[in-house]
Amino acid sequence: MIDLRSDTVTRPTSAMRETMARAPVGDDVWGDDPTVTAFEAAVAARADMPAALFFPSGTQSNLAALMVHCQRGDEYIAGQFSHIYRDEGGGAAVLGGIQPQPIEHDPDGSLPLEKVQAAIKGADIHHANTRLLALENTFRGKVLPEAYTRRATELAHAQGLATHLDGARLFNAAVASGRSLAELCQGFDSVSLCFSKGLGAPVGSLLLGDEAFIGRARRWRKTLGGGMRQVGILAAGCHHALEHHVERLAEDHRHAALLAQGLNEIEEIRVRDCDTNVLFVALPETHCKTLEAFLADQGILMAAAPVTRLLTHLDISAEDVRHVVASIKTYFSSHAVRGDNRLG
């Protein structure tokens, strides 16, 4: 199947599987898994941050970061459509007693700094204590502007807030912007990195920060059920991705642009955004279910909706993209869209 639903659907390559099978392992809760230790050190060095900690998922990594930065009754500021606020099951509130303060995004994915400033609470006992600013890069495929992240983190620190970066697709941002991982992490007290999206590892995220922060995060990881044993098998896959799959993300970006170009040729579809490996398109609502079913019969998976997100990744080739475009053209050529359902 050609799966466009997300880049989380990538499968480990044969070379990655071989690396994982050969990985020396220990007990990571005891701190003696050499493969995990080597991977954590390699990423921390590349990010120019003091320490790193391996997690089974980015959701747990983000949650642990929130629980280190904030106490019960504290507050963090995040984007209204950010993953850490909207798509992680409300874990900070449910498990940490931490209140979110969502801010509407600007079109480029940033949070307007005047709104961030206005949202920061003072010492009034009626208010939650604002402790943290959390940003996301990339956000819906968009790379946050360098000048913006510098101003945002400077504002937060000037107001006594810590800063956290949800960098689930930060390697995509690095490849698209030509900036190093270390440059993209500058100004943040903690960073979460995911290796199971476009990089193609089956499992794994890292949380980065200083030694004291990581020490506290290790305790929360155990409390949250993330302490694993011979996890070097998984860390080896992530380390392989770090060494072999980062630069090739540019290929995913080219395939997304190729897909956008082909879909732009279809009258019934409007391409809304195409950045890095993430594409958003508007579809006629009355055709979403039938289009999804038709494409499934053609070996193509998408979660069709009036606004549909499509992602290219390690398992999507240029030929796959051409097949997708041709199949959608075939569908609309045989399923006329009434005038009132056409997209402007």
Image (spheres, helix red, strand yellow):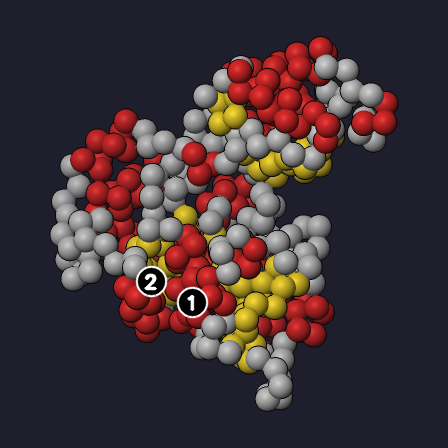
Q: Which residue is mark 2?
A: 224
Using the image, tell me which numbered label, if any, was put on residue 95.
1
Looking at the picture, how far across and down is residue 235, in whole percent?
Answer: 26, 46
At horizontal 33% and vertical 51% (from top left) the residue drawn is 56
Q: Residues within 10 Å of mark 1 (few under 14, many from 20)?
A: few
Looking at the picture, how far across and down is residue 270, in whole percent?
Answer: 74, 30
Label 2 or label 1, whichever comes before in sequence order:
1
At horizontal 29% and vertical 69% (from top left) the residue drawn is 219
**Residue 275 in the image: above or below residue 323:** below
Looking at the picture, how far across and down is residue 104, in whole percent?
Answer: 69, 59
Q: Report the front residue among 306 and 329.
A: 306
Task: For the C terminus, give its image quadrant.
Answer: top right
Looking at numbered disc 2 in the image, what kind of residue is underneath it? Answer: Leu
Q: Quadrant of residue 150?
A: bottom right
Left or right: 181 in relation to 206: right
Q: Secondary structure at mark 2?
A: loop
Q: Secondary structure at mark 1?
A: helix
At horizontal 47% and vertical 72% (from top left) the residue drawn is 97
Looking at numbered disc 1 in the image, what kind of residue is underneath it? Answer: Leu
- Report the Cα–Cα distance between label 2 and label 1: 9 Å
Left or right: 338 in relation to 215: right
Task: For the N terminus, give its image quadrant.
Answer: top left
Tags 2 and 1 in contact by the CB under 8 Å rule?
Answer: yes
